[in-house]
Amino acid sequence: MSLFAKKLLAVSAAVLAIGALIALYVADWATSFPKEVAAAPAPANSGGASLTLETVAAVGGKYSPTHPSWVSYLVRTNNRWERTTDFTVPANSVVHVTIYQFDTPTGLRNPFLSQVQGTVGSATLDGKPFTTIPPEEASHTFAVPELGVFVPLAGVPEESKHPCEEAPCEPSTMDHRTITFTFRTGKKGRYRWQCFVPCGAGWYFGNGGPMQTLGYMDGFIDVV
Amino acid sequence: MSEPNHARRFALIWGIASVVATPLVIVLLGPILPPGKSTEQAAGQVTDNTVLLGMATPVLLLVVLYLAYSSIYFRQPKGGAVLEGPAVRGDARVQTTWIIVTTALVLSLAAYGTARLLSDNGAGSGSGPTPLTVPKGPKLPVQVIGQQWAFTYRYPTYGGVEVPHLVLPEGKMIELHVTSLDVIHSFWARQLGVKADANPQVDNIAFVEPTKVGAFEVRCSELCGLWHGEMFDHGRVVTQAEFATWIQQAQVAYAPATKALPPYSTTYLPEPTRRGG
């Protein structure tokens, strides 16, 4: 084999190897989704399913070694908190959601979203029914635009005595707001949900990083 | 055997094919072209697409038929020696004809497009904050507000109420004011024949007159982040009576949010404008 042929072979092999590595990386990235968590059956007297979530200002290294400072949702499953934003819920049913909100206010960019919309019955904030909150007091929202569900989550006051700096945050010991609401799922399908408060600190318009990455401030509700 | 006059023969074939195919394309394909006829503007776009298709048909036939004709008559004979063809030296008549025809085609399309935009008040496109032409008569202003990743809609003549889904009355000229609260979006209601960029701090005006009751899709058509593909919505065109009832109910249903809204403005500079870090 001539020297030129050997060089050509070596370069071709190197290009192929690098291409394969890039393809593997892209394929892994494109097919990586957070773990899917099924909503728990609701108590018999209320029917449907239930989801228990918490919102934290910093998700911490335990849940996200690569992005410990990112704001995030966590879900309660098997008696522990997990970081995922893909939930499975039953079709044509009701889902009872409880959110323990541990973050401070950022404020809504569009005050229209400060009103509770699309829920079945009243939403409650710390045990009291509410329809709206002051837009500047919103810390996050839980919104499923295609289902018309928008629920603003009021923030914990900046001066709170027992703030939770990093997940996991325990409702029994740390300052938080408790929001409950129920929504109807309708037909089967995959529905995007997201936070509409620009809470992605340090990102363009507050909407990058955790706001555009599955597993933090947005995800999918799979109605099955 | 003497060589036939290929130019004349091909021109004849092409001419006949164009005369037959163009009306067929216009008559058969024209009525089913997008975006349909649910608004005056969409119907106008169907006409425009039909004109474009009609003009493109002879051009397409020219290319395809010439390729076929060449393949049949100018191919290398089987078993013959592979020879270089005669040098092409240029032909003033062909070149002049080509330049004149293509120039006429492009300029006529430019003139047609300009005339359509002016006669149809932007033909459903965003015309900026000061459109060159404005439809006469009463108009219903509706604001389209884009944000990552949803559109909402505000009706300034109904107390500034904002709603999550667009509802429009049939048979009324709508004046859409399209803007954004964060990055660049684009409001595209395909069935309405409306597409207008939603830029922060810009009031982009588009006019549309719905003529048919029914549902339509809204999509963002400007890459606005990783959730851009999920930024879609459904709207409705309803009768004027239904609209009157619906807007009344919306004013009541969204009264708490309306109280929290800033006064209606053609653009907004909302807080927080940027989350620091």
Image: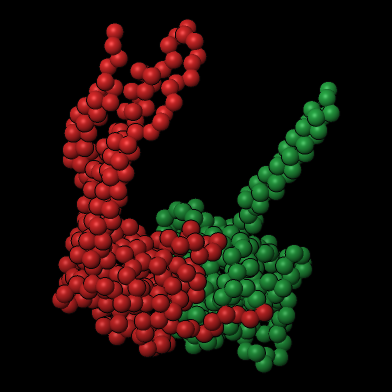
Chain colours: A green, B red
Give x and y (percent) for residue B147.
47, 72
Residue B126 location, quadrant? bottom left
Q: Is residue B245 left or right of residue B177?
A: left
Asked if residue B241 is positioned above or below residue B86 in the image, the reply reads below
Q: Is residue B178 left or right of residue B271?
A: left
Q: How many marks?
A: 0
Residue drawn at (46%, 62%), measured in percent from left and top? B222
Q: Is residue A22 visible?
A: yes
Asked if residue B199 is positioned above or below residue B41 in the image, the reply reads below
Q: Nearer the viewer, residue B239 or A49?
A: B239
Residue drawn at (29%, 85%), measured in percent from left and top? B159
Give x and y (percent) for residue A48.
49, 62
Residue drawn at (32%, 73%), measured in percent from left and top? B205
Give x and y (percent) for residue A73.
63, 69
Q: Nearer the viewer, residue B259 or A200?
A: A200
Residue drawn at (37%, 85%), measured in percent from left and top? B265
Q: Nearer the viewer, residue A141 or A49?
A: A141
Q: Is residue A118 visible?
A: no
Q: Quadrant of the N terminus of chain A?
A: top right
Give x and y (percent) for residue B39.
22, 61
Q: Is residue A162 left or right of residue A207?
A: right
